[in-house]
Amino acid sequence: FGFCDIKKFTETTEVLQEEIMEFVNTVANIVHTRVISQSGSANKNMGDGFLIVWKFPDFVTAEQITNFEDAPLHVVECVQRTADKAMAAFLKIMVDLRRSRELKRFIVTHELGQHLDGPGVGMGFGLHVGWAIEGPIGSQYKVDASYLSPHVNIASRLEAATRHFKVPILFSDAFQRLLPKNVQEKVRQVDCLTVKGSSVPLAVYTYDIDLQTFCHSGKDHASSNQTMHLEQQLPTADLPRLYRSFHHEFRTSLQLYIAGQWKTAKDHLERAHKHYASIMGEGKTDGPSDALLETMSMHNFEAPHGWRGHRKLINK
């Protein structure tokens, strides 16, 4: 399941007023086009949000997803293709939002940029995998085809958490393990959480994509259909120094944070900040690093009594 939501929607509505419908439909066209091109389906349009679904073929069983490492090769390849397409669709939507001439017109004409978080229209994205009950919901007056499942809610919670971590996309470990190995190498775990409505800890990941560099490259990598080689289609923030220095320090700090060694984790995070600023530019900070530092600072960098390596995320 994928969930995506337009950021700063309330502010955008106040600025655009009667033109907000055209704005939303422009975003919807971008979302739907990319999702369908990657074998997904748009299930719900909710004003500022969209519920997206990718379904596995009938021959793939829930048990095979649970014990994915032991599944037959044809099942593994099918599931990896599906997960890869879901990831590719969301990353390509990010690029299309920045490049859209229609959205740029809204930004320029209505001076919308001062109300947004970045240089273009932003969305948050959440991805999770799990079972669901599919069917009609409603009455004789109104019926919608929909999905009922706690896993749909988790995708929504992950999307909402992108604001806390200041990243465009978050996904669960359940989804991450289904990605092809070459894509897994590009993702980064940012925390271990329980979300509202679930007591099961989730290792939460993001995909570091350098949107600013890519959107000014003049190349339409996003038109490629070779989703099994995602890292060749979309640039990531994978400068050698960033991965060798920043990512090493961040991974070390996350391991220490989970282990409850918060003072040492703080030292590594501060070094990670320096590496990040030296590569991305002075004054630039990494959202997940900020989130971890903020969490630990509330406890004076001492893990709470009974710390089990995860925390409860407070959001919608």
Image (cartoon, rainbow, N blue to C red):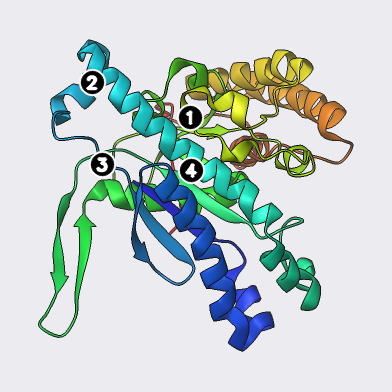
**Residue 203 visible to the viewer:** no
Examine the rendered structure and indicate whether residue 262 appears above or below residue 149: above
Task: Give the spatial CA distance, label 1 vs label 3.
Answer: 17 Å
Secondary structure, mark 4, is: helix
In primary-sequence order, the first of circles 4 and 1 is 4
Q: Which residue is mark 2?
A: 75
Examine the rendered structure and indicate whether residue 96 appears above or below residue 236: below
Secondary structure, mark 2, is: helix
Labels 1 and 3 touching (C-beta < 8 A): no
Q: Quadrant of residue 109?
A: bottom right
Residue at the far left in the pictured view: 140
**Residue 297 visible to the viewer:** yes
Using the image, tell me which numbered label, if any, was put on residue 173: none
Q: Quadrant of residue 216?
A: top right
Residue count near mark 1 (Cα–Cα under 10 Å), binned few <14, some 14–19, many ≥20? many
Secondary structure, mark 3, is: loop
Task: Report x, y in % for residue 22.
Answer: 57, 77
Using the image, tell me which numbered label, if any, was put on residue 89: 4
Task: Give the spatial CA distance, label 2 vs label 3.
Answer: 13 Å
Task: Report x, y in % for residue 80.
Answer: 36, 25
Q: Can you tell which of label 1 and label 2 is closer to the viewer? A: 1
Task: Give the spatial CA distance, label 4 vs label 3.
Answer: 14 Å
Q: Which residue is mark 3?
A: 55
Name the residue at 30% across, 51% down.
152
Using the image, tell me which numbered label, if any, was put on residue 227: 1
Name the residue at 50% across, 34% down.
225
